[in-house]
Amino acid sequence: MEEFVEFLTANFVLSGLWIVLFVALIYSFIAGALSKVKEINNHQTTELMNKHDGVVLDIRGQADFRKGHILGAKNVASDKILKGDLAEVEKYKSKPIIVVCNMGISAKPVANRLHKAALSR
């Protein structure tokens, strides 16, 4: 145990970074588990679309959307949703809404905004 304490004091910065990374990892797991917005895989997306009449909102730019998109997806600008302009999305209120983007990073804030507006389940 003395060696462990000696290592921590001798390598304070390295030990501190390790602790910060560990806390960030734990936080990401807990935040994901407690979030009302869930990340889903391809199978779950297909099931929501086919069995529950889910709507796919593609928040990528129009140029990327034209290059290729999920069949039946609706292209909606993410900045409009984040600013609170939900007029385009209101008609899908009763259906499961699946938000997709390029990498899955910008979809989470949009999905959270839709959930706060009570537009997604």
Image (cartoon, rainbow, N blue to C red):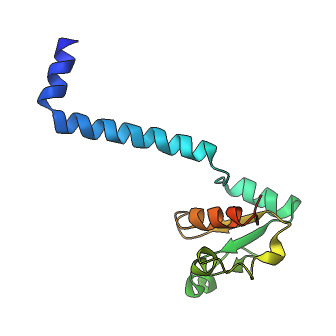
Q: Residue at x 61, y 76 (%)?
A: 59
> How far across and down, in percent of the image, does residue 41 sit?
66, 54
**Quarter of the image where the C terminus is located:** bottom right
Front-most of 14 and 54?
14
Q: Which residue is drawn at 46% across and 38% down?
A: 26
How many numbered tags mark residues here? 0
Image quarter of residue 4: top left
Q: Which residue is drawn at 84% across and 65% down?
A: 95
Looking at the image, residue 94 sits to the left or right of residue 27; the answer is right
- Which residue of the protein is positioned furthest toward the top in this rendering? 1
Relative to 34, is 53 above or below?
below
Image quarter of residue 74: bottom right
Image quarter of residue 77: bottom right
Front-most of 93 and 44?
93
> How far across and down, in percent of the image, does residue 21 sit?
35, 41
Looking at the image, residue 16 sits to the left or right of residue 9; the answer is right
Relative to 84, is 20 above or below?
above
Relative to 89, is 33 above or below?
above
> How far across and down, in percent of the image, does residue 53 sit?
86, 65
**Quarter of the image where the N terminus is located:** top left
Front-most of 104 and 9?
9
> How far across and down, in percent of the image, does residue 57 sit?
70, 73
